[in-house]
Image (spheres, grey):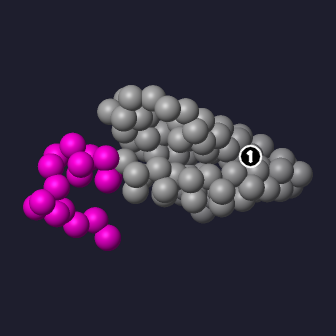
Amino acid sequence: MNTIDPNLTDIDQFKLMMYQRRTVVKISICVGIPLVGAMAISNFIKGYHFVAFLNCVMLLIAVLLGFAVMGRIDEKFEHKIYSFLFRLFDAAVGIALLYGIRF
């Protein structure tokens, strides 16, 4: 739940938001990397090369998010990285879904 506390300054609210975002990324990485890796292997075996390629792109994005979480970089730059990579991941998932349902 994302509520704004009037007692916190803008800097404290930004740090709280980044802590929550890091937690979500860590959970996503722990679940996402094995799951997307298994999907990529399965799609390569079945012969669905385009979907397997998209799964590999999603796997690469998850690994890059993992490096962003582990490395200590400027928080505002980290926020930009998260925003860009999550949008890119969403786009890859959307394309894979559209291709999967033959739209």
In magenta stretch: residue 87: no
56 relative position to 44: left or right? left
What percent of the width, then of the height, locates residue 31? 66, 60
- Residue closest to the eye, 29 or 47: 29
Amino acid type of the residue that numbered disc 1 sits on in the rendered structure: Ala
What percent of the width, then of the height, locates residue 88? 48, 40
From where the camera sits, is residue 61 visible?
A: no
Total marks placed? 1
35 relative position to 75: left or right? right
From where the camera sits, is residue 3 visible?
A: yes
What percent of the width, then of the height, locates residue 12? 24, 48
Q: Residue furthest right?
A: 45
Residue lying at 48% horizontally and 39% vertically, measured from the top left: 85
The quarter in which the C terminus is drawn is bottom right
SS at badge 1: helix
38 relative position to 14: left or right? right
Vertically, is 27 above or below 88? below
Residue lying at 10% horizontally and 61% vertically, measured from the top left: 6
Magenta region: 1-17
Q: Residue furthest bottom?
A: 1
The quarter in which the N terminus is drawn is bottom left
Residue lying at 16% horizontally and 46% vertically, measured from the top left: 10
In magenta stretch: residue 5: yes
- Residue closest to the eye, 68 or 64: 68
Residue lying at 66% horizontally and 57% vertically, measured from the top left: 30
- Residue closest to the eye, 42 or 15: 15
| Residue receiving disc 1 | 52
